[in-house]
Image (cartoon, grey):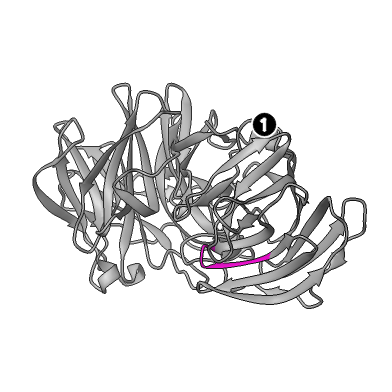
Amino acid sequence: MLRPLISFILSLWVLHTNAQQLVLPGDHPDPSVVKIDGTYWATATTSNWMPAYPLYRSKDLLNWKPAGNIFNTLPAWADYYFWAPEITYESGKIYVYYATHKKGGNLCIGIASADKPEGPYKDHGPIICQEVGSIDAFPVRDEKGKLHLIWKEDANSVSKPTPIWIQELNEERTKLMGQKKELFRNDAPWEGNLVEGVSMMKHGEYYYAFYAAGACCGAACNYNAGVARSKNLMGPWEKYDKNPIIINEGEWKCPGHGTPIEKDGRFYFIYHAYHKEESIYTGRQGLIKEFRFTPDGWIEFVSEAQKPVSIPKEMKDKFNGKNLSGEWQWSVFQKFNKQLKDGNLELSALPATGGAFIGQKTYSTNYEVLTEVNRNTSTATAGLVLIGDEKNLVGAYLKGNAVQLIQVKDGKEKLLSTHLVGGNKKGRLHMQVQDGKSIRFFYSQTKGSPKALNSQPIDGSYLPPWDRALRIGIAAKGAANQKAVFADFEVKYSPN
């Protein structure tokens, strides 16, 4: 089990917000939440980062502590795009419904289960795989108690409307039964080319379907959230004439795709949005907003001052434990080895462009990063990198008496500059990032002052993938039997 984040955070900022409360800082798209025995559990999309689907727990829906992951290794049938997990609880069992890409196929919905929320989770494989893709699953019982699965057909990927389907699911969660039925689709102007991310709750005489519409991701996003209702699960479904019900507000834009939850007789919606200034560089972050039911049977969100939330200000990893901190992630496309030994992280290399890398989420767009490389024991080139994905990154790479600045763009590697450095024991690589995209690198000896490696900032605006944010990390470049050895990793954030 990966180490919790708590020992990894040294100090925190307090961030004040208004009606929309930040509760899961950093890249946490499509958050899902459930209550289990007095504790709330949440998870979120990880896309092409492993471990897949982080777990968090909370007593108050505001303060969340990391509690492991759903998958620490890839399910045998899947290869990438780990999206939209929906964590649920019923009859003493935890079920997670999730979307991922099937090897040799398209996007499918899978199911995993566990006897306790922290796992371990057993994967049961895919349950539905449509030709154009199936995503965003949500289980719900009808008026007679029959279990059904709701999902989105990913038809917008082929420029077609996106129906929301429902079909009966057997109690073992191993197969769908009968015929699927369409509940609704994107037919309102504000919804654009899709509806997705449906989650439901029953209140009074109505089922309520919370859903998202529009473009979820990237700088040009126009995501919003709406609601529909029906007295019968199979419909007919009526969309609210005041949709969208959550729109750009205050510091946040492109809100949507979440889960409703009840706490002490009050109702909340946990969902994601981009910070207007940090945008694609810190990604879609987890928010919460209270809502209530209106006398006419609809819902309205409550606008009130919220409590401040703490986000990391300074983080430091000395690699003193037996396992990596839970902050670290790695690519689903890379297979490499790593171990902590004698207060160092030994990262096995890969000959791929950029090498093998691990990274962490960012919590601001202004920060400084430092790592110390053990030059005596490193046999591979050791890098300090800003990562979009395996085909897009920028880094300073140290080997022997030279530091190289390397840019990887669309899978093509470019050497920007080479700098000779002295010393023969340890060296420090520094990275300074402003506005999420302006990158400068420095080098220093253990006790020396940093020396600038690039006089003009490198433009990293091309780095963020369409569906996730940047990671800061370290890399090992070379043959698979080589290793880069790191003594520490430090990050200092500056408020925007």
* Residue 290 horizontal/vertical position (percent): 49, 43
* Magenta residues, dominant SS class: strand
Name the residue nearer the viewer: 423 or 408.
423
Q: What kind of residue is marked 1? A: Gly
Residue 308 in sight in this render:
no
Horizontal placement of 456 versus 160: left or right?
Answer: right
The residue beneath circle 1 is 321
Position of residue 352 relative to residue 60, above or below, is below
Name the residue nearer the viewer: 70 or 205.
70
Part of the protein shown in magenta? 389-395
Name the residue nearer the viewer: 424 or 411.
424
* Residue 359 horizontal/vertical position (percent): 60, 52
Horizontal placement of 274 versus 73: left or right?
Answer: right
Horizontal placement of 101 versus 471: left or right?
Answer: left
**Which residue is pictured at 55% across the width and 34% down the height?**
2
Badge 1: few (under 14), some or many (20 or more) residues near its Cα, within 10 Å?
Answer: some
* Residue 108 horizontal/vertical position (percent): 26, 52
| SS label for mark 1 | loop
* Residue 45 horizontal/vertical position (percent): 44, 50
Q: Is residue 230 magenta?
A: no
Position of residue 337 relative to residue 283, above or below, is above
Quarter of the figure that contains the C terminus? bottom right
Position of residue 396 relative to residue 82, above or below, is below
